[in-house]
Structure formats: structure tokens, C-alpha cells
Amino acid sequence: MVVIAVGVVVAALGVFLAVQTLDRADKFASVFGLFVAVAGLGLSAYGVFGARRAAGGQSVADSVVGGGVTQVRGVRGSVRFGPSAPGVGSPSIPATPQPSAPGAAADGVPAGDGQSVTRSWTAGPVRQVDDVDGDVDIDR
């Protein structure tokens, strides 16, 4: 529908400019070009900043994980994960989760662009790293 509307507007603009004298059509085209350029600049800025905000978060949901969870986001430097502390015996895999009832209340996944671990069981590392302006070193 939008493509058809844009096509009609472009065709009408073409007919309008075709019936004008060359000098007037040139002046109208310059003014139209200015408005298109300003609109394009605004949409470009919105796209750059909107994509940055809506980049999305990190989440772990409805999972069975053999360990812990680490989430890192928005660091303006380097990040280093050292080796995990030795545990007593080997980690056991948790029991399989029971499915939750469907619906918004049972969903549990937060809105927005944060990091989350929902409806998950863990017994080993899960590392989520986002938006780091440096190096990320992970030693195992």
C-alpha cells in the first residue's frame, strides 16, 4: 500500500514539473530536493540513535545450563574473566524445568534492552557480553 502511495505522489510530482516552464521546474525541484535532504538527514539520525537504543539485550530463558551466568554490558574498557573457582566435585546438571503456563504473567521475560536470565536452571558458566569498548579475555 505504501509503495502504491509513493508511486502516485512521484507520478503527480512528475506531471506537475512537466507542465511548468524549465526555469520554474528547476526552482521547484531545488526546493523539493531541500526538503527531501532534510527529511533524509533526520531519518538517518533517528536510525543511528534508534538502532543504538534498540540494540536489544541479552537473555537466557527456559534453559538448563550446567553452571553459572555472567552478564557484562556497556563497559568502556577491557573485560577479563578468570578461571572459575574450583568446585567440590563435578557440577551436576539440574533437573529439567517444568513448562510454565502460557500467558503474559508466566512469560517473565522483561521488556527493554537489558540482560536477563529467566526460567532457567544453571550449574556451569553462561557469559553474556555486550557493548564493550576494549578487549574481552576469557580464561578457562
Image (cartoon, rainbow, N blue to C red):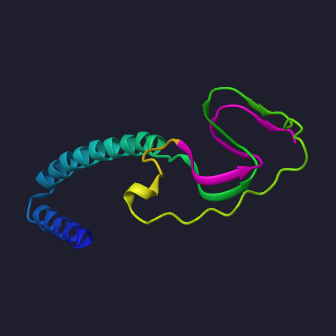
92 lies left or right of 26: right
Q: Residue 116: x and y, percent? A: 56, 45
Residue 69 in magenta?
A: no
Q: Position of residue 74 (x, y in %)?
A: 58, 32
Q: Give the range drawn in magenta.
A: 115-140
The residue that appears at 73% across and 29% down in the rendered structure is 78
Determine whether, in the image, residue 11 is placed left or right of residue 105. Answer: left
Q: Is the magenta stretch mostly helix, strand or loop?
A: strand
Position of the N terminus by quadrant: bottom left
Q: Quadrant of residue 51?
A: top left
x and y, in percent, of residue 105 in the image: 39, 55
Q: How many marks?
A: 0
In this orientation, which residue lies closer to the viewer: 57 or 83? 83
Q: Is residue 129 magenta?
A: yes
Residue 60 position (above or below residue 78)? below
Image quarter for residue 98? bottom right
Q: Which residue is drawn at 62% across and 62% down?
A: 97
Front in this rendered view, residue 133 or 23: 133
Q: Nearer the viewer, residue 76 or 23?
A: 76
